[in-house]
Image (cartoon, rainbow, N blue to C red):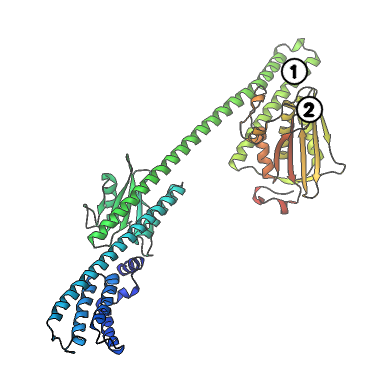
Amino acid sequence: MNSTVHERNTEEKGIPRLHRVPQYVWVTIGITLLTPLLHVIGMSSDLVNVSLIYLFPILVSAVYWGLGPAIYAASLSVIMFDFFFVPPNLSFTVADLRYIFSFIVYLAVAVLTATLSSRLRQQLEMVRKREATTNSLYALSRQMTAVTDLDTLLHHIARQVSHTLGTQAAVYLPDAHDELKVTAFADDLGTAVWGGEESEIAIAKWVYRNGETAGRGSTSLRESSGLYVPLRTEDQVHGVLAVRMEASDIQEQRERLQLLEACGGLAASAIARVKLAEEARAAQMTAESERIRTALLDSVSHELRTPLTTIIGSATGLIENDAIFTPEDRKELTGNIRDGAMRMNRLVTNLLGMVKLESGMLQLRRKWCDVGDMISVVLTQVREFSKHRSIRVDLPDQPLFICGDEVLLEQVLINVVSNAIKYSPDYSEIVLTVTRDERNSRLIIVVADHGVGIPDADKERIFEKFYRLESSRHVTGTGLGLAICKGIVEVHGGTIEADPNPGGGTRMSICLPMEAPEALFPYRGQGEVE
């Protein structure tokens, strides 16, 4: 594993794979081959140019392998230059003592050149490391900004840190009982999972409790095989980020510690952000649930009070004063009781329908339904509270059939027609039109009234639960009817829309497919076709 990390770091620094071969061997081979080459090309007598050419192996060694191989190349170049080119040839003695001074100057220049090249190489490596660190931190920051789920965030953190450092990484977070557990781990090298042993968890717990860095490369628990940093914000320690530390060089350990602490700071901020977002969502859901509960109680209590008062009053009158009532009076009182009971039944039906829609328990009993028969049932249901209004029905000459749940579709039409009756003035006309779109094989039912109408800004919101227009607050209702209609129609594969009526008022358009169930319904487990 150490060799794999070393090879990876070597490639990242731009050092070729020849680094695996001993560097001094390559220096020796290069200078040895260069010496006969200079004789072959006829430069053996030009000592100035020969000495300059011998600088190339020195520079190459300094750039690729550092100061040690460069000094070795300089020394070997001086030896080769003296032995093969300086008179007398093939001897280490020199005819002119001035060459000794030249050798010293040459060696000094070569060492100085190698030192400068080595420093440039080190600076280049440092710049590359800083660039890689900056890119890693930027990538980690970008990923953490885009993630809103805590589990996904933790796995992104572990994977990015493992990829950046080329080693195994683990993230520890406390559970519901404040016990530190390995929540996410990653291994960029494909070896066994690290971080789950008791000793490693014990160190992570110590870091979590004390809020201090520990492990190899730090000032605490140096004998550990990993490096652990707390995921700490200003007011809280959220967890621990750990990596397996295999670097033995103190400088490399220090660099990894700095990088890991930077990653830990970003991770802690992201975890705090996600937790705050989850708390905000939970608070919003609680507030929304409370609002819905209050609205439901207010609406239901208000809606139930009127029919209950009517039923109680009529029933009490029949019980206590039965002798003084004429048959017509008794018929009127019993009719009031029936109307109140039917109104309560519609309210309960809407509430149960909304519960089924919200819970996914709505089951369709599909069969072929005669549209004309359904409309007849709807008109019978709304006749008792449609006084002073006329309902005109326009049906095609040929009977129309639709495949769906007859009871639920009737509930949709009853809710829509009831709304048209409630929100239209006395002695106005309500038009119910049924047409067939032959090209798309769809049934279109339009209910048009001459009521108060719906503003364009509220055309979509009227299908939300408990939403009511400001202009209709004086009319009793819960705001559930159209929400239930939308849910039932969409389960049937259709749409429902509200548009302005050209003559004033509102047009509710219900569009339903007319195909057979095999081509229409993807919800085959929700019912059967009769």
For the residues labelled 1 and 2, the Cα–Cα distance comes to 17 Å
Any part of residue 420 in sight: yes
Residue projecting furthest to the left = 97
Where does residue 224 sit, x and y in percent of width and height? 24, 57
Report the front residue among 363 and 428.
Answer: 428
> Which residue in the protein does label 1 denote?
333
Residue projecting furthest to the top = 324
Disc nearer the start of the sequence (1/2): 1
Q: Quadrant of residue 302?
A: top right
Q: Quadrant of residue 98?
A: bottom left
Count numbered badges in the picture: 2
| Secondary structure beneath label 1 | helix
Q: Amino acid at mark 2?
A: Arg
- Give residue 242's mark: none
> Which residue in the protein does label 2 denote?
383
| Secondary structure beneath label 2 | helix
Disc 1, disc 2: CB below 8 Å?
no
Mark 1, other Cα within 10 Å: few <14 / some 14–19 / many ≥20: many
Report the front residue among 522 and 461.
Answer: 461
Report the front residue among 336 and 245.
Answer: 245
